[in-house]
Image (spheres, rainbow, N blue to C red):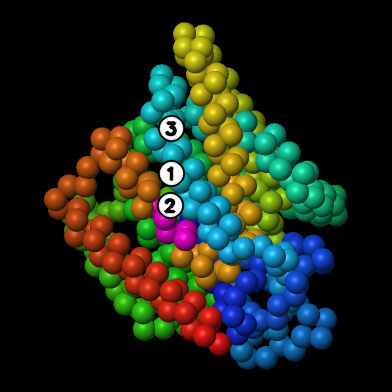
Amino acid sequence: MVGEVAGRRMEFKSSYKACCVHCSPDRTVFRAERRHCAIFPPLLPDPAARTDDAGVTAIFYLPYGVPLYKGVVLSVASSCLFASLYFYTSLLTPLGGDAIFGWRMLLMLPLITLFIVVSGEWRQVSAIFARLRQTPHLLGLLCLSSLLLGAQQWLFMWAPLNGHGLDVSLGYFLLPLAMLLVGRVMYGDRLNSLKKIAAFCAAIGVANELYRAGGISWPTLLVAGGLPLYFILRRRLATAHLGGLWFDTLLTFPLALYFALGQSGEALHQTPRLYALLLGLGVISAAAFMSYVVAGKLLPFSLFGLLGYVEPVLLVGAAVALGEQIKAEQWLTYLPIWAAVAVLVADGGRYLWRSNRR
C-alpha cells in the first residue's frame, strides 16, 4: 500500500533501522533524531529527550538478529500480492466490483483479527475501545476514517473490472507527490532540490492531462487526494496502527455485508467455484496487509518507502494484462510523472547512502 509508505517521511542521524512505537520493550534501542512526520502519530520520546528546532530525540526499537533481507522480501511480496488482486478480480466473473469489495472486507476481518491476537497487538484495539468509552463522539471520526479507507478498497476492486485500472495506478504514482504538497502546505516541510524537480515533472504530467482530457479522472483524484486525507485523519486520531486498521475494517462491515450478500446470491448459486476463489481473495488480501505491516517493522523507514514504489509499477502491468492501453496522447502524462517518481527514488537512495556512511 503505497499510501502509507508515502507518509513515512522521517530523517535520522543514526545509520538506519528504526521501527514503530508499538514494538515491545525487549528490543534493541537506537537513538535518532526524528523530524515531525506529516502522517503518523509521534513516536514515544525518550523521557530525557530535549525538543529543539531540529527535532526530537526519540527511542526506536528493532528485534534482535533480524536480517534486512527478510524485510525486503516481505515488502516486495506485499506489493506483488496487492497487485495480484488487480488481476484476481477477473477470475471472479460474474461477480461485479461491488460484490467483490464486500466479500473482500468480510473475509479480511476475521483474518486480521487472528493476526492481531497472535502477534500480541490486541492491546491497540482495547485502547481504542477505552477511548470510545471516555469520548463517544470519537465514533463519528472513526466512521469517517473507515469511509475513507473503504472508498479506496472499493475502488481497488471495481477499477480493473471497469477499465479504470491505469487511472488508479496513476493515482498511486501521484500519491507521494501529493504527500509532498500536503507536507509543505500543512506542516511546513522544506523541499530539497530533487523534490522540487520531482514536483516540476509531476506538474508537467498533470498539466498535459488537464489539457488533453479537461481534467484528471475521478479514480486518479480519489487515490491521490483521498489517501492523504485518510493518513492525516489517522494521525489526528492516533490510530495509525493495526488496531486502527481493525476498526476501519469492522466499521465497513454493514456496507460490505450488503454488497456481498445482496449482489452475489445468484452468481454463487450458478458458479460454485466462486466460493473457493472468494476464500482465496480473503487470504491474499490479509496476507498482503500482514506482510506490509511486518515489513514496516523490520525495515528502515527510507528503504521501506523506496520499496513501496514497486506496487504502482506492478499495477500498471496488471492493468495492461487485463486489456487496458496507454494511448499515444497519454504518454506525456505518464512519462513526466514516472520521471518524478524516479527522482524521488533517487533522493531516497541518496539519503540511504549518506546514512550508511555515517
Question: For the point 47% across and 79% down, which residue is it?
Answer: 353
Q: Are the two marked residues, 3 and 1, in contact with CB atoms closer than 8 angstroms?
A: no
Measured Cα–Cα span from mark 2 to mark 3: 15 Å
Any part of residue 235 in sight: no
Question: For the point 66% across and 67% down, which residue is it?
Answer: 19
Any part of residue 177 in sight: yes
Q: Residues within 10 Å of mark 3 (few under 14, many from 20)?
A: many
* Quadrant hosting residue 207: bottom left
Amino acid identity at mark 2: Glu
Q: Quadrant of the C terminus?
A: bottom right
Q: Are the two marked residues, 2 and 1, in contact with CB atoms closer than 8 angstroms?
A: yes
- Looking at the image, is mark 3 or mark 1 earlier in the sequence? 1
Measured Cα–Cα span from mark 2 to mark 1: 6 Å
> Is residue 339 toward the left or the right of residue 13 in the image?
left
Label 1: element kind: helix
Q: Residues within 10 Å of mark 1 (few under 14, many from 20)?
A: many
**Residues shaded magenta:** 307-312
Residue 310 located within the stretch drawn in magenta: yes
The foreground one among 106 and 145 is 106
Residue 111, compared with residue 17, is above or below; it is above
Amino acid identity at mark 3: Tyr
Q: Residues within 10 Å of mark 2 (few under 14, many from 20)?
A: many
- Residue where numbered disc 1 is placed: 83
Q: Main secondary structure of the magenta part?
A: helix
Q: Position of residue 248 (x, y in %)?
A: 65, 45
Q: Position of residue 80 (x, y in %)?
A: 46, 46
Label disc, if present, on residue 311 of the rendered structure:
2
- Residue where numbered disc 3 is placed: 88
Amino acid identity at mark 1: Ala
Residue 234, compared with residue 266, is above or below; it is below
